[in-house]
Every structure is written in C-alpha cells, then in structure tokens.
Image (tube, helix red, strand yellow):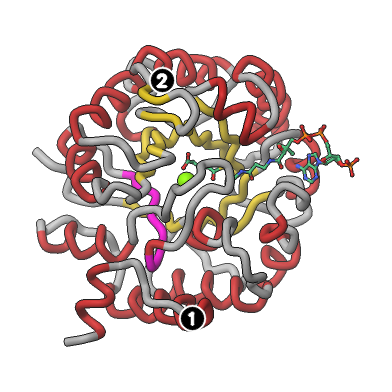
Amino acid sequence: QLPSRVRLIDVGPRDGLQNEKTPVPAEVKIGLVQRLQDAGLQEIEVTSFVSPKWVPQMADNAQVMAGIQRQPGVHYSVLTPNLQGYQASLASQPDEIVVFGAASEAFSQKNINCSIAESIERFAPVVQAALAAGIRVRAAMSCTVGCPYEGDIAPERVAYLAGLLKQIGVQRVDVADTIGVGTPRKVQAAIEATLRHYPIDDISGHFHDTYGQALSNTLAALELGVWNFQSSVAGLGGCPYAKGATGNVATEDVVYMLHGMGIDTGIDLDKLIDAGSYISDFLGRQSHSRVAVAMLNR
Ligand code: HMG
Ligand code: MG
C-alpha cells in the first residue's frame, strides 16, 4: 500500500545553487522561490547560514530571505550548522531550521569541520533554542549509504546518528544519499535503520541522481511508506564537499512519476517546468529534468 499523497520539499534554491560557480544574484533566487510556490510547492529550502568562505553562493542568505514574498501555508527552511548560523538566521524568521550531520566521520570533517560527536554537541544548543522559539527542526543525515571518502556505510551507523539526533530533540530527519551511489535495497536499509528512532511520517528521502538511481530509490522509499521527499527543480545541484556529486533528483521527474501512479502532490507540473526553465535559462544550460526536456520538446 503506497502513500496516497506525497509532500515535496524543493531544495533547489539551496542544495541546487550552493555549488554553482557563477554567482546567482539574490533577485534570481527570489524569483525561483516565487515560481516554486506558484507551482504549488509547500516547502522550500531557501538558503543556508554557513560560512561565506566555505560556500560563497549562499552569502546572500539574509537578502534572499528578506526578498521572498511569503505565502500562507508555505514553509521556508534554512540550513544552520551552528549557533552562529542559527543566530544569523533569526532575523529572517525561518519556519524551520536544518542542522546537517553525516553517518560518515570523514564526510563530517570535510563538510562541517568536526567529528560526528562534536557536530551533535554543536547542534544541541541550536535545536534547543529553535524549539524554544517555536521554530521547527529538521536534520539532514548525509552519506547514509555511501561516502566519497569511506565507501559503503553500514545501516548501523545511520541508526547511531539518527539516535543521537533524536536525543537532542530533532523533530524529523532526511535520509540523504549525498553522492547518489545508493540502490533501492540499500536505501531501504538506511530508512529501516532510521525507523528505529523516528516514525515514518518524520523521515524524508533525499536522493541525488549521480548514478541515475534516484527515482528508483524514491519508489523504494515509497514502498516503505515514506511520503516526504527532497528534490530539486531542474535537477540542480551538488554538494561542494562531495566531489563529482550531481544534483538532487529533479522535482519535475518525481512529480511526473507520482502523478502517473495516482499519488497526489498538490503541484502543477506545467508551472513547475516553467520554474525549471527560469533557472536553467539563467544558468545557460539545459535542465537536468528528463521530464522537463521531454515536455518542452513535444
Ligand atoms: P569552522 O571553520 O569550523 O567554524 O566552520 P569556526 O567556528 O571555527 O569559525 C571559523 C570562521 O567561520 C569564523 O570567521 C566564523 O565567524 C565563521 P573568521 O573569524 O575566520 O572570519 N563562521 C560562520 N560564518 C557564517 N555563518 C556561520 C559560521 N560559522 C562560523 N554559520 C562551518 C564550520 C560549519 C561554519 C563551516 O564548516 C561551513 O560553513 N561549512 C559549509 C557546510 C555546507 O554548507 N555544506 C553544504 C551543505 S550540506 C549538503 O549539501 C548536504 C545535504 O544536502 C544532504 C545531503 O545531500 O547529504 C544537506
Ligand atoms: Mg543534498
């Protein structure tokens, strides 16, 4: 029995653009967020409050958050790896903050410059402060099936991280396949490991399409009952600390698959394709969404 409804969190403005070499002006990011909400997205990951030395593309975080036209019913989230980022994000009034840890020690070091244990110590006061302020808290768990530095990641390590996140009060978690190496059964094992600590409603799938497995992995997650997914319009993206990692699964492709299976998303595919064309045109390249390319060439 598959879920009858799926909620998609578009991470294009954040995960999608963070790795772009050409600076994308704040107005373009704001325009992208506008088009995503117009298409029916109810959750949008807008930006991150991280070091501008590490991720220059996200340096305009406050400007982007100030420029978006908030729509009732839409939730806007931002990444905050530490208290400094959390405090900087407050003026922007995010609906949800996202801390991001890794199931792999080496990736934790490369991405956020600390061990897994240290990351939990850094997240704890952030989580506590956000919850006290009535801001929702999500955590991304990177490298839940494979790591660019350590190779295969055992499900036990995912369970370990999920348990730590639960202990510090994180409300929901993303099971991320950062470098897209996962295949359906491995992704299901990572989700099952997470289920030891979080109920299915609080688990989302975050699949990168580097090896072309992301839609299959999405279907595998649906089979377990997962109904929250992150995806990126036009398949934008990649992580700066995961060499060769390409974008998230394209939101258009996920929507096409789900609608074809009779699963409701609340998203207007034509308007979503317009949003993808807007950003692809700006970047001067063809969309990575197979569905968008096919439908535009019809
Ligand atoms: P650090 O160097 O260990 O931090 O960086 P620090 O506390 O020692 O501070 C050093 C400098 O950074 C200081 O500045 C701080 O002010 C500044 P200086 O005195 O040298 O001028 N700093 C900050 N500035 C702005 N905002 C902040 C902040 N914190 C410190 N929040 C830190 C630690 C985490 C900040 C750094 O490693 C960093 O920014 N990393 C970037 C991580 C990132 O954005 N990665 C991409 C997102 S994660 C992802 O894509 C995966 C995901 O999609 C899921 C998946 O697919 O796996 C979520
Ligand atoms: Mg990602």
Q: Is residue 218 above or below residue 155?
A: below
Badge number at residue 240? none
Residue 54, horizontal then vertical, whole percent: 72, 47
Residue 81, horizontal then vertical, whole percent: 67, 37
Does 131 lie within the magenta span?
no
Residue at mark 1: 284
Residue at mark 2: 158
Q: Residue at x 38, y 29 (%)?
A: 146
Tell me which segment is drawn in magenta. Answer: 228-234
Q: Residue at x 62, y 45 (%)?
A: 79
Which tag, 2 or 1, sits closer to the chain's start?
A: 2
Q: Tags 2 and 1 in contact by the CB under 8 Å rule?
A: no
Residue 290, horizontal then vertical, whole percent: 24, 68
Residue 155, horizontal then vertical, whole percent: 34, 17
Q: Is residue 266 above or below residue 125?
A: below
Quadrant of res 270: bottom left
Q: Is residue 172 visible?
A: no
Q: Is residue 64 left or right of residue 1?
A: right
Q: Residue at x 38, y 68 (%)?
A: 234
Quarter of the image containing the C terminus? bottom left
Quarter of the image containing the N terminus? top left
Q: Is residue 134 above or below residue 71?
A: above
